[in-house]
Image (cartoon, grey):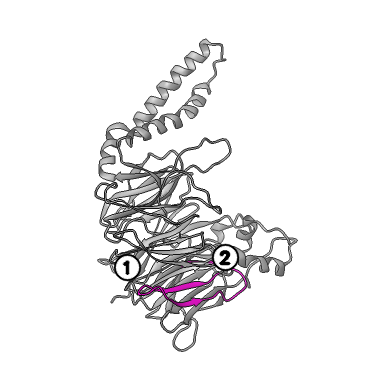
C-alpha cells in the first residue's frame, strides 16, 4: 500500500460533500447569508507569539476562556479578549482542564508525563485552581520584570564564575546563560506559586465529551493513581469526591481494567456512566457507587452520554456501532450499526428532546441525526475527496482513495435550544453548523481548504498551502447579544466566530 503523510494530506485536501442534510423539499441545506466563511473572516484572532494552542474550554457563564499552551493555561476575558492571568504550575504539558459549572473562579487541570525521549518520569497530577487567589499570589511574587531581573543577576554571577575558572569571556556568554537559566527559574517560581494549592494524584478525562464535574458542580470525577497500562489489563478505578473540599464524600467505583474514555452523570446526578476500552459500558448508582448495569461489546468503547430525560444511555464501540440502552431495565433499545466497512464513531450528543441523537464517525467524516424512538436516520452528511488535489507524481485516484481515512468527526454539539447542530471535523479542521429549524448552514473553513475563495494568504506563492491542523471547537451562548460564540483552536491561535441564535 502506498505511503501517505499528514503533510501530504494537508496539501491535497479540498472540501467537498458526498451527502448533505436536506430540506423538507429534498434540497441540500443552503448557506445562510454570509454563511460561508474562512480564516481571516473571524471576529477576532487570539495570538500567543510563537506558541500554538492545542486545547481550550469555556466557563459556564461564558465570561472566561481557558487556553492551553504546553504547561501554561491562559485565562482570557471574553468581554475584552485580554489575558486575565496565566496559570503556571504543571511540570508537563496540560492534558485536560475544566471550569466548575457553578463557579467560574474554580478550574481543575491535569498533566502527566509524555514519556518523550530524554525526559524523566513525573506522576500525573490534578491541580485545583482558585483563579482569584492565584492572581493575588502571582502579582505578589511574579512579574516578567522581576523574573528578568533574577535571571539577569544569576547569569551575571554564573558568567563571572565561569570566566574565573578559565572559560573564555565573550559577548554572548551571558545571553547563552540567560537562555539556559530562565526556564529553571520560571519552573521554580511556578511550583512555589502552587505549593499551597490543593493537588490530587491522578488525572481527569476531557476527551470525547467526558465530564469532569457533575451538572451542579458539587461532584468531581477523576482516575486516581499513577500511570496505568492501556491496551492491557490494569486497575482503572474511578473516584468521585465532593467539590466542597475535593476530598470528602468519596465514592470509589471498581471494575474497569483498561483505559476509560468517557465518564459522566445524568441530569439529576442519580446515575453515573463509564465507557471503557475493556469492552464494557457500566452504569452506576451515583449516590452509593453500586453498579446498576454492565453492558458488554466486542471491541474498545469510546463515547457515551445520557439522554436529557435519563431514559436512555448511548455509547459507541470499536465496531463502529452505536448502542442505545434503556435506563429503566438495562435492555437494549437499538444498535445502529456502521454503514461502511471502516471507521469508528467517537462523537455523540443528545438533542434536548431526548429523542434525537447526533453521532459523528470516521472515514469521510459521516454525521448522523438519528431518531432513537423510530430507529431511523433523519439526516446524514459525509465529505467527499472529489475536489482534492494530488502532489506532483502521485496518481489522483490513489490519493483520493486514501484521503477518507484521514477525515473524522471529533465533536458534535446541539445548541440554541436544539435548533442548531455544530460539527468539528479533524483533517478538514473546520466547523459546520446546521440550523435545523431554518434549514440553512454555516461553515468556518480552515484557510486553503475551500476552492473558490481567496486563499492567497494561505499559500506560499508556489501553490503550497501553509495552513495545517486544528484541534477542536468551543461553544458558548451570549443570550443578551442573541448570539452563540465559537472558539476554534487552530495551530496558529484561537479564532472567534459569532453566530445568531434562532430563539425559543
Where residue 22 appears, as percent x and y from the top left, is 48, 83
Q: Is residue 353 above or below residue 194?
A: below
255 vs 457, left or right, is left
Q: Secondary structure at mark 2?
A: loop
Quadrant, the N terminus: bottom right
Residue located 34% across and 74% down the image: 352
- Are circles 1 and 2 on residues that touch, CB within 8 Å? no
Left or right: 21 in relation to 83? right
Q: Which residues are magenta?
A: 320-347
Q: In the picture, residue 170 is in which quadrant? A: top right
Q: Nearer the viewer, residue 198 or 445?
A: 198
What label sits on residue 483 in the rendered view? 1
Give the residue displayed 45% in from the left and 40% down from the top: 123
Please name the residue that numbered disc 2 is placed on. Answer: 407
| Residue at the spot 46% in from the left edge and 89% down from the top edge | 25
User: Magenta includes 75?
Assistant: no
| Count of numbered circles in the view | 2
Q: Is residue 163 left or right of residue 282?
A: right
How far from the left and from the top, in percent, is residue 259? 49, 55
The one of 32 and 404 positioned closer to us in this rendering: 404
Instruction: Say which label, 1 or 2, has the lower sequence index.
Output: 2
Front tag of 1 and 2: 2
Q: CA distance from mark 1 to mark 2?
A: 29 Å
Residue 455 versus residue 369 in the image, above or below: above
Residue 440 percent location from the top left of the image: 42, 78
Comparing 497 with 291, the one in front is 291
Q: Can residue 444 be seen?
A: no
Amino acid at each position: 500500500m502506498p505511503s501517505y503523510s499528514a503533510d501530504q494530506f494537508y496539501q491535497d485536501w479540498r472540501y467537498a460533500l458526498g451527502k448533505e442534510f436536506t430540506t423538507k423539499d429534498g434540497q441540500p441545506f443552503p448557506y445562510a447569508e454570509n454563511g460561508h466563511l474562512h480564516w481571516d473572516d473571524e471576529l477576532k484572532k487570539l495570538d500567543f507569539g510563537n506558541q500554538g494552542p492545542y486545547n481550550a474550554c469555556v466557563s459556564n457563564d461564558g465570561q472566561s476562556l481557558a487556553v492551553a499552551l504546553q504547561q501554561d493555561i491562559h485565562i482570557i476575558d471574553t468581554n475584552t479578549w485580554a489575558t486575565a492571568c496565566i496559570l503556571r504550575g504543571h511540570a508537563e504539558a496540560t492534558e485536560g482542564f475544566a471550569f466548575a459549572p457553578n463557579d467560574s473562579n474554580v478550574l481543575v487541570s491535569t498533566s502527566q508525563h509524555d514519556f518523550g525521549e530524554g525526559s524523566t518520569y513525573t506522576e500525573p497530577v490534578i491541580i485545583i485552581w482558585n483563579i482569584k487567589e492565584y492572581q493575588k499570589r502571582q502579582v505578589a511574587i511574579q512579574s516578567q520584570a522581576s523574573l528578568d531581573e533574577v535571571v539577569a543577576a544569576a547569569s551575571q554571577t554564573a558568567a563571572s564564575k565561569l570566566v574565573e575558572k578559565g572559560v573564555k569571556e565573550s559577548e554572548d556568554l551571558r545571553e547563552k546563560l540567560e537562555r539556559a537559566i530562565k526556564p529553571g527559574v520560571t519552573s521554580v517560581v511556578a511550583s512555589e506559586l502552587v505549593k499551597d494549592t490543593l493537588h490530587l494524584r491522578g488525572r481527569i478525562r476531557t476527551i470525547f465529551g467526558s465530564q469532569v464535574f457533575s451538572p451542579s458542580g458539587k461532584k468531581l470525577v477523576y482516575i486516581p493513581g499513577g500511570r496505568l497500562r492501556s491496551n492491557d489489563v490494569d486497575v482503572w478505578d474511578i473516584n468521585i469526591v465532593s467539590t466542597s473540599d475535593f476530598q470528602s464524600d468519596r465514592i470509589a467505583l471498581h471494575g474497569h481494567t483498561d483505559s476509560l474514555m468517557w465518564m459522566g452523570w445524568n441530569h439529576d446526578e442519580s446515575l453515573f456512566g463509564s465507557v471503557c476500552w475493556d469492552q464494557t459500558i457500566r452504569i452506576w448508582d451515583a449516590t452509593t457507587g453500586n453498579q446498576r448495569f454492565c453492558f458488554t461489546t466486542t471491541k474498545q468503547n469510546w463515547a457515551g452520554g445520557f439522554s436529557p430525560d435519563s431514559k436512555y444511555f448511548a455509547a459507541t464501540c470499536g465496531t463502529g456501532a452505536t448502542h442505545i440502552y434503556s435506563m429503566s431495565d438495562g435492555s437494549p433499545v437499538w444498535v445502529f450499526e456502521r454503514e461502511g466497512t471502516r471507521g469508528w464513531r467517537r462523537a455523540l450528543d443528545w438533542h434536548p428532546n431526548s429523542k434525537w441523537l447526533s453521532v459523528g464517525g470516521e472515514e469521510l467524516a459521516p454525521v448522523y441525526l438519528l431518531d432513537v424512538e423510530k430507529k431511523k436516520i433523519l439526516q446524514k452528511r459525509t465529505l467527499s475527496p472529489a475536489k482534492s488535489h494530488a502532489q506532483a507524481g502521485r496518481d489522483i485516484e490513489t490519493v483520493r482513495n486514501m484521503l477518507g481515512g484521514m477525515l473524522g468527526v471529533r465533536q458534535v454539539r446541539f445548541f440554541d435550544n436544539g435548533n442548531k447542530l455544530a460539527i468539528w471535523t479533524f483533517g478538514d479542521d473546520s466547523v459546520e453548523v446546521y440550523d435545523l429549524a431554518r434549514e440553512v448552514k454555516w461553515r468556518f473553513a480552515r484557510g486553503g481548504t475551500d476552492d473558490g475563495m481567496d486563499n492567497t494568504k494561505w499559500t506560499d506563492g508556489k501553490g503550497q498551502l501553509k495552513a495545517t491542523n486544528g484541534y477542536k471547537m468551543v461553544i458558548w451562548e451570549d443570550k443578551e447579544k442573541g448570539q452563540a460564540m465559537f472558539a476554534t483552536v487552530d495551530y496558529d491561535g484561537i479564532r472567534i466566530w459569532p453566530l445568531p441564535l434562532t430563539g425559543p
